[in-house]
Amino acid sequence: MACLELPKNKIKRKKDKKEIGQEKERKTQPEREKEEINKYLEKIYEPNLRNLLTGCYQCGCCSGICQLSKVQRFAPSKLIYQILVGYEEKVLSSGILWECLTCNSCLQNCPEDVNFAEIVRNARYKMRKIYNQNPSIHIAHDGIYLTISEIMCKPFIYPERSLEWIPKNVKVSEKGKYLYYVGCLPFFKFEFNSLDSIAASSVNIIYKIEKEPIVI
Ligand code: SF4
Ligand code: SF4
């Protein structure tokens, strides 16, 4: 029996755990996150949207309840119909499914338990992968609100919190009975000028019952 010897440089060596660990470390945090998101998306991805819609009998309840349909032309039942009759490509390439709030109100009222938000999540995966759509140009205000919320919940980012919005008449303390957590509200001032007045009014109300509330 002939025995074939591979040249040493062609033999693929299995990476040991240490090397895999080092490779992982070399990746930046955003790269690792992107990888994890892609893995998750692949796991939940249903390539044929029609498979998720077969129960729909076009009663229209979803379009009636959808809050988006009250302010703009957005009717989930109509979009479902278009996908069912073969216009999926047209629906996806239009980018309209970026508009859905994925609030699930329609699911709660659907007699057939059609999960439109789940369809939208799958469709968005396709819209990014196949149609190369950039979510930030479709999502309201370039997705800045989502970005801020994401930044606020990352344990490794510490955005500087300005407490300048606290009314001058209010003293705050580090200890006390009442605590007001302002969250990300003041960060939105860049767009809505008087938004932090909500926080200021809330602190003023707390101040009526606690002379030095805690504010974080
Ligand atoms: S409520 Fe359900 S069954 Fe009725 S049109 Fe919407 S998705 Fe279809
Ligand atoms: S999940 Fe989308 S389609 Fe359904 S009610 Fe919310 S915004 Fe409307």
Image (spheres, rainbow, N blue to C red):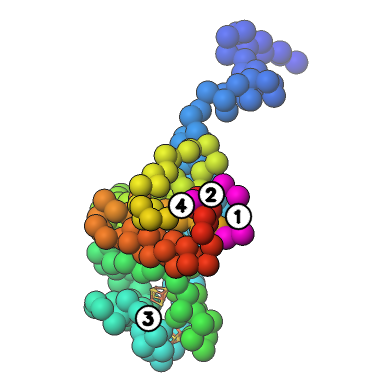
Of labels 1 and 4, earlier in sequence is 4
- Which amino acid, mark 4? Lys
Q: Residue 76: x, y in percent?
A: 36, 78
Q: Which residue position holds label 2? A: 173
Main secondary structure found in the magenta portion? loop
Q: Which mark is residue 160?
A: none
Residue range highlighted in magenta: 172-178
Are the two marked residues, 3 and 4, in contact with CB atoms closer than 8 angstroms? Answer: no
Q: Residue 77: x, y in percent?
A: 36, 82
Ligand 2 - quadrant of the structure image: bottom left
Of labels 3 and 2, earlier in sequence is 3
- CA separation in Å, label 4 and label 2: 7 Å
- Which amino acid, mark 2? Ser
Q: Is residue 180 left or right of residue 100?
A: right
Are the two marked residues, 4 and 2, in contact with CB atoms closer than 8 angstroms? Answer: yes
Q: Which mark is residue 66?
A: 3
- CA separation in Å, label 1 and label 4: 12 Å
Classify mark 3 as within 8 Å of ligand 2 or not, answering yes or no.
Answer: yes
